[in-house]
């Protein structure tokens, strides 16, 4: 388009470079003059869903914010593991509870079973056991750390998990309190070799 005798590219309309096509590296057909590197400039394809920490999943899925987590300790964020009593007063289920009272005298709660049902596998960093149960507890004889385990069942006795090499494994609920050391993966996610 011409504005005041000059094209948008800044060249004069009667010049041999109408519209500034050559200056922009384009031919008159609108194609790049030098096709090398054109594919490199394309935006990358949408990445496959990456595994997330338990804290990240609660922020994205349950709408929690940083204020719902505790920060006192070497591996924040932290959360509380509690129970949720149903209105019928006959059912009590384990839940993630906000570290702080964020709803007046109450804490936000998310049922562990329904939250983990959105994911197909869990991986535990040894830091979770070291921090909850003491030094030396984060070794392979205690729990298969760094392996993706299928989530089978959630109860107050812990998470019942399954690994192809490990078989049936139970993860104590206490370890879930170290939300930065628990990794979750959805079906189709890119596998990780271990926590970072």
Image (cartoon, rainbow, N blue to C red):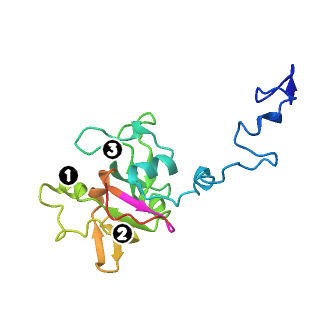
Instruction: Decide which of tag 2 and tag 1 comes sooner along the chain.
Output: 1
Is label 2 or label 1 in front? Answer: 2
Residue annotated with mark 3: 77
Question: Residue 163 is drawn in which quadrant?
Answer: bottom left
Tag of residue 148? 2
Residue 59 shown in magenta? no
Task: Specify the segment rendered in magenta.
Answer: 183-188
Relative depth, front residue between 136 and 34 = 34
The answer to whether marks 1 and 3 mark residues whose Cβ atoms lie closer than 8 Å is: no
Relative depth, front residue between 156 and 74 = 74
Spatial CA distance of label 1 from label 3 is: 12 Å
**Left or right: 71 with respect to 32?**
left
Residue positioned 70% across, 48% down in the render = 33
**Left or right: 162 with respect to 1?**
left
Q: Residues within 10 Å of mark 2 (few under 14, many from 20)?
A: many
Horizontal and vertical percent position of residue 48: 52, 61
Tell how many labels. 3
Query: Which element carries disc 3, helix, strand or loop?
Result: loop
Horizontal and vertical percent position of residue 148: 36, 69
**Left or right: 98 with respect to 72?**
right
Does residue 43 lie above or below 143 as drawn? above
Residue 49 shows in the view: yes
Residue positioned 34% across, 51% down in the render = 179
Spatial CA distance of label 2 from label 1 is: 21 Å
Residue positioned 35% across, 76% down in the render = 162
**Left or right: 21 with respect to 93?**
right
The answer to whether marks 3 and 2 mark residues whose Cβ atoms lie closer than 8 Å is: no
Q: Residue furthest top?
A: 4
Tag of residue 145? none
Relative depth, front residue between 42 and 65 = 42
Tag of residue 131? 1
């Amino acid at each position: 388009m011409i504005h005041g005798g000059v094209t948008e590219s800044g060249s004069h309309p009667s010049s041999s470079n109408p519209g500034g096509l050559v200056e922009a590296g384009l031919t008159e057909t609108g194609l790049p003059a030098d096709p090398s590197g054109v594919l490199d400039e394309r935006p990358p394809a949408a990445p496959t869903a990456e595994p997330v920490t338990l804290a990240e999943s609660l922020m994205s899925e349950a709408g929690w914010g940083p204020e719902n987590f505790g920060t006192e300790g070497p591996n924040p964020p932290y959360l509380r593991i509690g129970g949720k009593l149903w209105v019928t007063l006959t059912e009590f289920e384990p839940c993630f509870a906000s570290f702080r009272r964020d709803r007046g005298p109450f804490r936000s709660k998310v049922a562990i079973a329904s939250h983990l049902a959105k994911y197909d596998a869990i991986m535990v960093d040894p830091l979770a056991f070291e921090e909850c149960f003491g030094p030396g507890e984060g070794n392979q004889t205690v729990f298969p750390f760094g392996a993706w385990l299928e989530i089978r069942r959630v109860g107050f006795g812990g998470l019942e998990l399954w690994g192809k090499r490990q078989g049936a494994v139970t993860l104590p609920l206490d370890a879930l309190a170290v939300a930065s050391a628990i990794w979750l993966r959805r079906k189709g996610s890119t596998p990780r070799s271990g926590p970072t």
